[in-house]
Image (cartoon, rainbow, N blue to C red):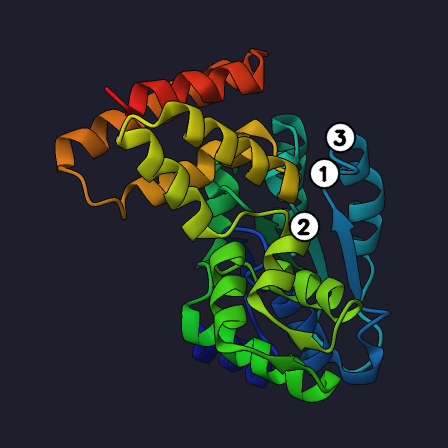
Amino acid sequence: MVKRVKAFVEQKNMPHLLFAGPAGTGKTTLALVIAKKMFKDAWRSNFLELNASDERGIDIIRSKVKDFARTRAIGDVPFKIIYLDECDALTREAQQALRRTMENYTQTCRFVLSCNYSSKIIDPIQSRCAMFRFRLLEKDQVFQIIDSIAEKEVLKVDEKAKQALYQISEGDCRRVENIMQSSAAISKHLTEDVIFSLASMARPKEITEVLQLAVHQKFTEARDKLLDVMLTYGLSGVDVVKQVQSEILKLDVDKQKKMRMIDKCGEIEFRMTEGSDEFIQLEALLSQFAI
């Protein structure tokens, strides 16, 4: 992907681009890098960034986007760039209007579209764009970012804290940076405890203890431990269920039991989203694990 984008910049020629992938993986950053490398000091005059989730009606495409696209680029550059973030939030009518604009003003403007779900973009737009699929960062990439930030901000980060940051962020670079910034305001020495307390997420071993108590039919102890964890970290019921589901896979029980436990997690999570009382549903979940 990097080689293809680099070639576009060097040749000062590129098709319309579609960036698809989860949040915090660098889609907006890459669009800004393309603009700055291609346009140099004139990038602000030739680059328009819009968030389609804020302005997603057909009027914004007909007015602001069309007006910017129809004028020629400023300076010795072949075209302007319009970056539409979260364009999967655009209505279908707006996407149809965007398709026509992309078609009519190719000589003066290129579009870079960013979305979380490419399936929500209509086929005529997808066929006009070169697709780039982003994925969540690998562990070594997250560690490189952590080390770079720690060096520049003069922070000391424990190895367990790095593991905790990766586990909490699940490869989302933006979340890593936000948690590190919050933690650094408390202490220049980032530990596992500091990270988990600020991320509002229980430590995996605490959730595992709850599961072990429930599986061994110690319901009262499991309930009390879970309540204590929720109050300590300020967790919601849905947060707990998601963590429980991930820790079930690590339990030393037979595979059939794991499947039944995960099935119960799905059922309880659905009940919570429908408005059921969180504590009653979590108690019901723990009771099912003992069977």
For marks 3 and 2, give the CA distance: 14 Å
Give the percent coordinates (x, y) of residue 141: 47, 75
- The amino acid type found where label 3 is placed reads Gly
x 73%, y 34%: residue? 56
Left or right of 77: which side holds 114?
left
Residue 117 in the image: above or below residue 59 = below
Give the percent coordinates (x, y) of residue 8: 54, 76
Of 38 and 104, nearer the camera is 38
Residue 5 in the image: above or below residue 283 = below
Q: Is residue 266 visible?
A: no
The label shown at residue 57 is 3
Left or right of 95: which side holds 269?
left
x 64%, y 43%: residue? 232
Of 207 and 262, nearer the camera is 207
Question: What residue did someone put label 1 on?
Answer: 53
Residue neighbourhood size for the residue with mark 1, other residues' Cα within 10 Å, grouped as few (<14), some (14–19), many (≥20):
some
- The amino acid type found where label 1 is placed reads Ser
The label shown at residue 85 is 2
Q: Is residue 259 visible?
A: yes
- The amino acid type found where label 2 is placed reads Asp
Residue 269 in the image: above or below residue 227 = above
**Res. 237 image quadrant:** top right
